[in-house]
Amino acid sequence: MQFQSQSQGNQTQSQSQGNSFSFKDYQTDNFYDEMFTADGQTRSGYDQFKQRVEQLSREDVISRQHAAERALMSMGITFNVYSEGEGTERIMPIDIIPRVIPSDEWNRVERGLIQRIQAINLFLNDVYNDQHILNDNVVPRDLIESSKCFLPACMGLKPPKDIWCHITGTDLIRGDDGQFMVLEDNLRCPSGVSYMLENRELLKQTFPEVLARTGVRPVSDYPTRLLQLLQHIADRPDPTVVVLTPGIYNSAYFEHSYLAQQMGVELVDSRDLVVSGGYVKMRTTKGFQTVDVIYRRIDDTFLDPHVFNPESLIGIPGIFEVYKKGRVALANAPGTGVADDKVIYAYVPRIIKYYLGEEAIIPNVQTYICREEEDCKYVLENIEQLVVKEANEAGGYGMLIGPKATKADHKLFRKKIKENPRNYIAQPTISLSRVPTIVGDHTEGRHVDFRPYILYGDGINVIPGGLTRVALRKGSLVVNSSQGGGGKDTWVLY
């Protein structure tokens, strides 16, 4: 990129002008900061980055930030926002100051995520088969059966290799004490991995020498690992793999096409696939070709209009029957969405204890379950201090942040909870950790969360990185891209 060739000259200029970039005026403001301790000391892993950046001029750092933003646009890395009339396509902004996770912290995160995915996979298999956990009332039966994402058609289902959740994006946060907590699980169609990959490529060009010296673990092999996972569940030599997208108007269409291209497989939509002779076939210029594995990026209920939503125009009629007969593999398995339910999330520590006999390595955020009388009473009385979430909403929607909401909003959500308590949970308002973020010509702290990606194929593998989402609006706790958030590269150290 152009800014690399300018950097050495700008460095010399900064030394002569005394206009070097500096963090000396940066304030942690009593939040847990990923880069600095409360007394201004640099945290483990950030030394090389801080030293290098402070050798550059302020103008050089800002020009690198602008160049990264231009590169995102030129590469076409966009997402769609349906609710805005002025245009649906926008980039997910990047901030070039990375989030760094030392190896000892990462080792605990990795162990915790492997434990969580192992337990959730056992839970899904049990819920759709023997239902021991429901019979033992560890998870209430009516909670499962009333979940919008529980699919009775999947009862008795046995996916290939007994793997249900092949690709998971689990959202983690840190509070004031600096400990990671699980905010939610995403098992149906977790998105954002393309931003993880492209943010790393941009940081390689922005600070190549720092990456080389700091000992950052690579994430670029994600498409290779994903393809190996998909081939593994086919259980046949040289399988035909495709990525199934809802189409060009989907918010994550760029990611669908990007991953298909990186894996070297076909990107298809419902017009390209048909069930014929008991198999799923793909239309090609040479005729029909049998498809062995489908990485689906459409929701469970839209997969097959014969079985689920009869109004679906983006599914493939008859595909579920082919799947049940073991003639095509789907990732993730239909039915996994029941574990995305935010009320069922609250039971995951109990699920881990039930199946593995272990305490959760990474705890959940404290959660009040509104279907339980005492919890509901507490939520209604303290809604001004809580974050209230609908069970099956995502993207920052269907949520109330009590301290920032109006009295009218409080009243509305009290009414909603009373009318349908099963559909809501509440959590304390947690001051998410912050990372220095470029604002104009200086840095300010902005709140972040973290979505690492876990692949379950021949074993459970946690990608050593992930998508750090940053709330670019000052004081905001909402990091979702659809709500004005951006991204940072995540450096996991050896």
Image (tube, rainbow, N blue to C red):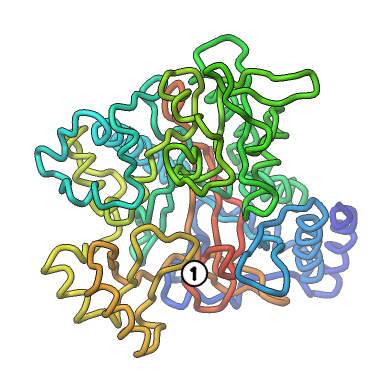
Furthest residue in direction top, as rendered: 237
Residue under pointer 1: 478
Q: Position of residue 442 (x, y in %)?
A: 68, 75
Count of numbered marks: 1
Tag 1: amino acid: Val
Residue in view at x 39 percent, y 31 percent? 164
Dividing the picture into quadrants, the one containing residue 439 is bottom right
Instruction: Find numbered disc 1 in the image and state the secondary structure of the residue it sits on.
Output: loop
Residue 72 in the image, given as x and y percentages of width and height:
76, 56
Would residue 426 appear left or right of 398 to someone viewing this image?
left
- Which residue does the image show at 22% across and 75% down from the upper left? 418
Q: Is residue 399 above or below residue 230?
A: below
User: Relative to 458, does residue 50 appear above or below in the rendering?
Assistant: below
Q: Residue at x 39, y 45 (%)?
A: 337
Front in this rendered view, residue 36 or 401: 401
Residue occupying the point 64% across, 60% down: 97
